[in-house]
């Protein structure tokens, strides 16, 4: 039973990746509708051997659509998602627009697919850095109840969008030529630099990206009281977010037990033989759908702590793959329109 | 009263920086002797308008030397430092050779210059990532006793040496041209990547770089029981190590109080107005001797915690500047040979 699919923001980095992954996963696409804001409309995108023209967004186009993937800024999602829902589509939204709305499930299928039940037309896919974190936290929480999480991130520029990738490459060229770097997308150069600044800053001194990690992790894990702190940092990497993570649990989890639990966890791959140079790396996670975890060891500063290193492709599992998996989970449960 | 100075490893990245900083700081150099292992001997290095030839290392050359800076691998320090001491020099050693030897002071002058008293000829300068950390921890410890520290690092390739800087630039060129990257210095590509691997790995799963941060911090702070955990990561940055740090103290320190204490701390510069894009950055710390701290905020996951972001030039304060400051402190105290 094929479903009619729309991808809104189809010309962007994540939108294109959604189209690619729908094909890769043999998603049962009936009619495919690609949309973008006026600026990007008109381009063509290939899907299953056929070229599709990206159309300018218009509410009426959602007529007959059953699943609509939104990969657009929050402002556009807020405006258009209700229009799609009104016409019978289930919206899977990648933006921050609805992530803290208690009536909208925030879902990583391997962790909390049950939250899809009773959705009211919109499902949110979490922020990239949250997705890879909760995939690893969940099995540890099941083992011994996670009490506190401290995370610092090493985030790729593709998370910002295609213009940021271009900026990094242009700046790399200029740096090699000894020319000055002129930041446009970021407030400072990103080549040969790291920026402890992602999204705006909240009054408490945390960036909004850091607060997303805190609040979304609590929601997905269904642990409103979970203690989480984060420092999110942009690094000159094209694809693949990395995270250095410390986890405190109610009962001590020996590293071997954590490793065994993570080896069994869906969507997680353990790469953990550091002496042999085996640990997760952004360049190796790029193009993959799994979340990679390694450097699993005792937190020698806390008797019930673990330290880990988590890496995933921010455009795939961190964005497009998770959205498509949400659609698959909805269909399995008969929860599409 | 000028002193005769030797720089061993003068042709390396840190050795050259020591010579540069001796000149910058008007260090009272009498005779200057530059040495290196056979491979690098023969080159010339400019100091105060004169060219000095780098000579092959030989124990007898230390005759008449009062202060000898060692910027060589641990193995070479272990062999040659005692020869220099035997001939009356005070050795300031940048390697890991003596850092855990209780008879050798491990010194960051702003933090524990008193430890110089009673030295037995060798003084160790700590690892780069430790120096910038303790400069910030000390004023917080004085305020409210630090109980636990969690650190993740973003370390520049110049910390590995000049061949690593070349590898990064070569790989950036290849990446731009779409050619494969062939790692030689590092086990994996460093351009467009991050490596959670610095130095070898210890049996507990921590890298030796991580354990240096733990053990050296304890020694310098004179807090053998201090709880410290670290994840050290190499990033594609040329100069400037960054650290995301969480600090737990016995009494809660409000961020404003921490900021005020750090503004008064010697060698520390507070850069903390994130909404205006003001926070420490490796590209801005490069070429500076201070340690920069910002993103000072509550650790929202711990009632007596702070989160901070610390950056310093790893070749200057992280290495050469600290060594020269140790020499200055020795001279002020009349502790040179």
Image: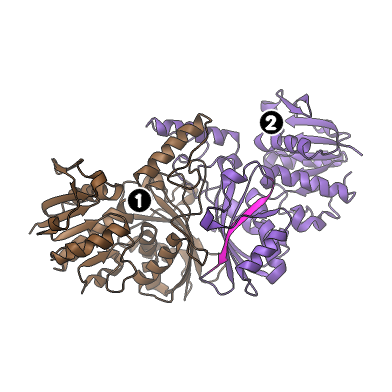
Chain colours: A brown, B purple
Quadrant where the C terminus of chain A is found in the figure: bottom left
SS class, disc 2: loop
Q: Is residue B204 left or right of residue A136?
A: right
Quadrant where the N terminus of chain A is found in the figure: bottom left
x%, y% of residue B272? Answer: 59, 57
Q: Which chain is home to disc 2?
A: B
Q: Which chain is home to disc 1?
A: A
x%, y% of residue A207? Answer: 47, 60
Identify the residue at image location x=19%, y=42%.
A42
Q: Nearer the viewer, mark 1 or mark 2?
A: 1
x%, y% of residue B276? Answer: 53, 54
- Residue A53 visible, this orientation: yes
Identify the residue at image location x=73%, y=41%.
B77
Q: Which residue is mark 2?
A: B11
| Residue range corresponding to the magenta coloring | B289-299
Identify the residue at image location x=70%, y=30%.
B37
Q: Is residue A184 magenta?
A: no
Q: Is residue B241 left or right of residue B86?
A: left
Q: Which residue is mark 1?
A: A313
Identify the residue at image location x=53%, y=42%.
B237
């Amino acid at each position: 039973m094929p479903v009619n699919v729309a991808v809104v923001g189809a010309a962007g980095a994540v939108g294109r990746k959604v189209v690619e992954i729908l094909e890769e996963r043999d998603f049962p696409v009936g009619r495919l509708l690609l949309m973008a804001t006026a600026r990007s409309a008109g381009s063509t995108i290939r899907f299953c051997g056929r070229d599709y023209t990206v159309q300018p967004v218009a509410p009426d186009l959602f007529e007959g659509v059953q699943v609509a993937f939104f990969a657009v800024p929050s402002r556009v999602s807020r405006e258009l998602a209700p229009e799609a829902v009104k016409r019978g589509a289930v919206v899977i939204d990648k933006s921050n627009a609805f992530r803290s709305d208690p009536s909208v499930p925030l879902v990583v299928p391997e962790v909390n697919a049950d939250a899809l039940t009773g959705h009211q037309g919109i499902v949110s896919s979490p922020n990239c850095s949250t997705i890879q974190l909760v995939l690893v936290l969940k099995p540890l929480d099941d083992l011994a109840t996670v009490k506190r999480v401290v995370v610092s991130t090493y985030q790729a520029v593709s998370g910002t969008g295609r213009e940021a990738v271009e900026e990094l490459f242009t700046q790399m060229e200029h740096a090699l030529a000894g020319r000055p770097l002129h930041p446009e997308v970021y407030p400072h150069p990103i080549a040969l630099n790291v920026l402890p600044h992602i999204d705006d800053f909240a009054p408490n001194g945390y960036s909004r990206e850091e607060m997303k990690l805190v609040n979304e992790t609590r929601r997905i894990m269904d642990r409103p009281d979970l203690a989480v702190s984060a420092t999110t940092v942009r690094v000159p990497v094209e694809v693949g977010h990395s995270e250095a993570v410390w986890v405190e649990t109610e009962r001590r989890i020996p590293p071997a037990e954590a490793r065994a639990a993570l080896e069994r966890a869906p969507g997680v791959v353990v790469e953990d033989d550091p002496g042999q140079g085996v640990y997760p790396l952004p360049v190796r996670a790029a193009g993959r759908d799994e979340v990679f975890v390694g450097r699993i060891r005792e937190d020698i500063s806390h008797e019930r702590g673990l330290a880990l290193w988590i890496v995933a492709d921010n455009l795939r599992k961190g964005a497009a793959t998770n959205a498509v998996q949400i659609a698959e989970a909805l269909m399995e449960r008969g929860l599409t329109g």
